[in-house]
Image: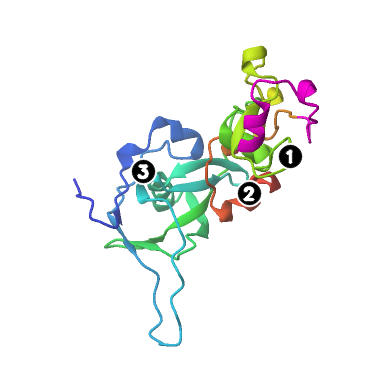
Amino acid sequence: MHERQPGSVTPLVSEVSPTTAPYGASDPPDPVPELTVAPPPRSDSPDVLPAPPSPSPPWGRRRVLLLNATFEPLTALPLRRAIVLLVCGKAEVVHGDAAGLVLHSATGSVEVPSVIRLVAYVRVPYRARVPLTRAALMHRDRFRCAYCGGRAETIDHVVPRSRGGTHTWENCVACCARCNHRKADKLLAELGWPLRTMPTAPRGRHWRLLAGLVDADPLWLPYLGETAA
């Protein structure tokens, strides 16, 4: 068993669970060598300053957007599973890491990916109802308060739960802290407040992916639709 060194990534084939079968990783992959991270090359010229490192999640929480062969977004994979698909030839890199990081091994190198694409098309079952999550609701309302249009910070039930309101797409909106405090458990009719837009359940396959995302890499946005921007 390899020991993980600081700044290294050791893809473990055994960590590829059966749930990855729809994404082309069901066949037993070839052994994956230990890969270490190499920083992007630096210029020796004193006139060229190195670009500041772009913020990225720690390796253990790093995610990679997986696209179908048709460029339809499928899911956000852990980095280790994405590397397995690349090394086994089942996926290809569409967009590399913004910082230009490369994973090196004794026998080759792999560009740290941000977006990868399956080589072969896979059919994925489609479930129409998108789960209601804070991340998806914020994306639906574009991070704007449904009452004043300011920056949203929380979620509010249009009809309060204490007065029979349900926790559904049609009764939940993004809301700023000030409006949330002022509204409390009152009805909009009691306050004379209008809704800027009528809340509805979003539709589309990419919304299932957005429902589980908190922070999306900017390189993902063209594949997630303008609603993610």
Residue 69 pos. (x, y %): 59, 47
The amino acid beneath tag 1 is Cys
Q: Between residues 62 and 172, which one lies in front from this camera angle?
A: 172
Query: Would you name the residue on which mark 3 appears?
Result: 29
Total count of labels: 3
Going from N to C along the chain, the mark reached first, 1 or 3, is: 3
Three-letter amino acid code at the position of disc 3: Pro
Instruction: Report the residue marked by disc 1.
Output: 148
Please indicate, yes or no, whether residue 207 appears anywhere in the rendered image: no
**Residue lying furthest top:** 164
Where 37 sits versus 168, above or below? below
Q: CA distance from mark 2 to mark 3?
A: 28 Å
What amino acid is at disc 2?
Tyr
Specify the label residue 223 is tagged with: 2
Local crowd size for mark 3, using a 10 Å CA cut-off: few (<14), some (14–19), many (≥20):
some
User: First in sequence: mark 2 or mark 3?
Assistant: 3
- Circle nearer the viewer, 1 or 2: 1
Locate residue 16: give its quadrant.
top left
